[in-house]
Image: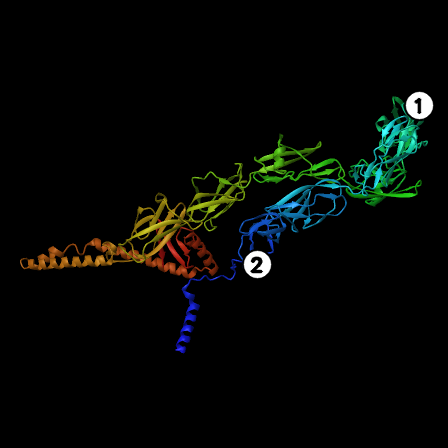
Amino acid sequence: MKRLTALSILILLLVSLVNPLGEEFVELEEKDIVSFQGSAAVRIDITSPAYVMTADEVITFSATLYDSVNSIVAGEVTWSSTNGTITDDGTFYPWNAGVISIQANSGTLTTIYNMTVEAGIGQSLEISINSASVLEANILTANLVDARGNTKPTLDAIWTVDGEFLGQGTPTWIPQDTGEFELGARLYQMETSKQINVISGSPHEFLFPSNMQIQSGGIVKLEPSLVDINGFEMANTAAGAKLWNVENGTVNSTGWFFATHPGYWNITVTSGGISGTGVIRVVPSDATTSELQIIPSPNFFIAGEKYELTSFRTDNLGYSGTITPPISDFSVTSGSLSQEDGRVFWTPMTEGLQYISVVDFDISSTTSVVVTHGTAIDTKVKLSPSVVSAGQQSTLSVYAFDLAGNEWPVNASITTAVGNESALTQYSTWASFVPDSTGFWRFETSWFDTTTDIRFDGTLQFEVGYGELALITLDGQGSKIAADIAFDLNPHFYDAYGNQLYDIGLNWTIDGEDSTLEMILSQNQWIPTTVGSHEIQANAAGIFSIVTLSVSAGNARTLITEYDEGFIVEAGVPAEIFIQIADTRQNLAPAEEVSTTISNETGIFEPSTSGRGYWTFTGKIAGQYELTLVQDEAEKTLSLTIEPGEAVQLFGMIDGTDFQQGDYALLRIYGVDGEGNTVKVEPENTTISCTSGSTEFITGDTWEIEISKSGLDRSCTITWNGLITQYFFDVESVLFGGAVGSTNTAMTLAGFLLGLVLITLIVLVRRAKSIDDEDWIEDEFGSDYYDDDDYDDDEDDYDEDEVIEDSNNSIQEDSSKFNLSDAQKKQLAAEASKLGVMQAAPGTEQGSSGWYVDVSEEVQYWNVGADGSWTRVE
């Protein structure tokens, strides 16, 4: 039972731990504050998430109330801050940078938390320096300003002074003068500027104006300037009250000075340990008399030296003394006036007698002085004239000069440093110079001034130029030029001494007309337009030059002939053609450099002896051609016809070689000129004699030959225009002497006749049966077969053959006696080959019966009949 009770209690305890007594519970966060009711609060603690914040941030404070046993108790807390805004829940919105007190109150309890607020992100830029001291180091600083106007320094600003870059960060600025300056600062996109007044430093001394002047009996307020150690002025009251002291006259405490006696008087002022001294000049009052004075006053005045000008005045109070009238009251005839410290000075310049005047209170005073040149400070060499040409006489002289610019000649020595020494002739104070050439010349001078014991050396160098224009030369006199090519006249210019001049403008006249503009634009190159003789004249400064040029046609652009329709020539006969060229300006001229593309085998094209522009063409091979003529850039093509020339040889040719009696052959006849061209024969002027038979003209150059006679070396003799040729051929004899044609024809005819005879015999045999044999024989065969005429013909043929045989025997006997040397045979054979006709041997007349030699050097005997027929005798 005890064990059961203990176990039950343990289970209840565990359950209560999980959910104590079944009640709901609240889990506390780690930071939650648990307060208990019933105890009184004795203190307040403020808790902040940060110790430092920027003005751009927001922070929430919390306050905790504690009782006497340091237990947290509940209570109402109110919030307040010395700057910024804080809400009831402790949310703080800062305003100004600095240490801000955050106060928490609960009843009578109070606690304070000091929060450091820094400036936030800069929204603008401001310059923190407000003034600067002159000639002292001033450090420039700038602040960033946040959205609530809080500032914090920046070390990255870029600085400018009056727009000029000074530096970056916190540079040091040392102003060189007082006054207003504009400082500029820039940081990224932020920029600002500020006018800074630069002031002087601490008082150092009083300064009186120079040249203080007052008339005797007058009164003037003395106002010295108060300056710092660097001389920068400030208000003269900055040092305090002033004490005055004057050497003559009186001055009151306010600085008014009362003048009495004329003269220079010292005045002293003192204030708080700061003092200053000045000089005041008291001059006589209104003048009764006044006289100009020069200080010093020598017997003569030196140019360039200063002399003081004053006026000695006596006033109406009886006081006398020197005064200096205003500079405007003085006048001088030479030199200059200047004013220094209230004093007027005169510096004479020009040598000679000079006058000085002054007007003092309507009283005029004038004095005259003699001015001489001053001390020489240097020398100069003068060349007259200043521009020297070769051959021109000039002078060299040495002059000394003073500060005032006065010059006077001195007897210096002059030597030639560069150039021909003989061109210079030395005299006492000058030298004569006559240069003999152009170019650079240099002279050196030396003069010793005995008054100052100083030696002065000088040099003069100059360029000796050319003389005046005396000659103009032009290129091309008498030259022959082309019309379309620019000709450079190349003018050259020379002076009287032969020195060449340059850059001289010319006036041009061509054939009497002004052509200056054209020649200038073409840079002295003349482009002729017409052929012929032209006169060109150039002149400048009254000098003329003339050249005469002969202008011919320019390069050929076109070729002109009279054979545009065609050029017909005869082979072997020179034909003349006149050719002209036309240039770009259509000027005509004989063509003298013509070439052609035709070959020399076709014809020869060469200049003619007839004159310029004439050419001859000798054709060789007959035919139609194109004759292309070329000269320069021109080209012309003519239709060329070369016709055969006059025949020098005559030829006859028969088609075929084997002829028989009764045949017909075609004989072709043609001539050959000296170039080997075939020449047609005219039938009406042609005579043909053939030993083989008759001939008949067919057409053109062809005749038909009737071959009726047989034999060896039958021939045809052809005569045309004085030319003779022969053609030999053999004719084979045939049956019936060829009366019925060739042998074949005769055999055919004989066979036919034989057939007829046989047929006739058969018929007669058949008829003989009916008639008597003798009567038939007598009737048919008795009378005709043995006709006397036939017998006579046979005798005649026998006689003719016998005569020919006897003649041949006689010729053979003569042939054994006739003999020619080999040289004679060769000579006659060559002539026969040339002329195409057998040549008569010595002792035989050409064209008559006798011995002949043919082209094969064979010696033959020929009978020439009365009818012109030729018969070879074997």
Pick the quarter of the image with the C terminus. bottom left
Nearer the observer, disc 1 or disc 2?
2
The kind of secondary structure element at disc 1 is: loop
Query: Which corner quadrant of the image does residue 204 belong to?
Result: top right
Query: What residue sits 63% from the left and 38% below the top?
Result: 523
Are dots 1 and 2 in contact, CB under 8 Å?
no
Whichever of callouts 1 and 2 sits on the residue coming sooner in the sequence is 2
Query: Which corner quadrant of the image does residue 449 belong to?
Result: top right
Mark 1 neighbour class, 10 Å CA radius: few under 14, some 14 to 19, many 20 or more: few
Mark 2 neighbour class, 10 Å CA radius: few under 14, some 14 to 19, many 20 or more: some
Residue toward you, 86 or 704 = 86
* Mark seen at residue 424: none
Query: Which corner quadrant of the image does residue 366 belong to?
Result: top right
For residue 328, above or below residue 701: above
For residue 445, above or below residue 818: above
Position of residue 53 measured from the top left corner of the image (x, y, whole percent): 59, 53
Q: State the colouring used for the structure image.
A: rainbow
Question: Along the horizontal axis of the image, is 811 left or right of 32?
Answer: left
- Number of dots carrying numbers: 2
Position of residue 653 measured from the top left corner of the image (x, y, whole percent): 35, 53
* Mark seen at residue 317: 1
Residue 863 visible, this orientation: yes
The kind of secondary structure element at disc 2 is: strand
* Badge 1 amino acid: Leu
* Badge 2 amino acid: Asp
Position of residue 721 measured from the top left corner of the image (x, y, whole percent): 40, 45
Q: Which residue is mark 2?
A: 67
Residue toward you, 816 or 256 = 256
Residue 44 visible, this orientation: no
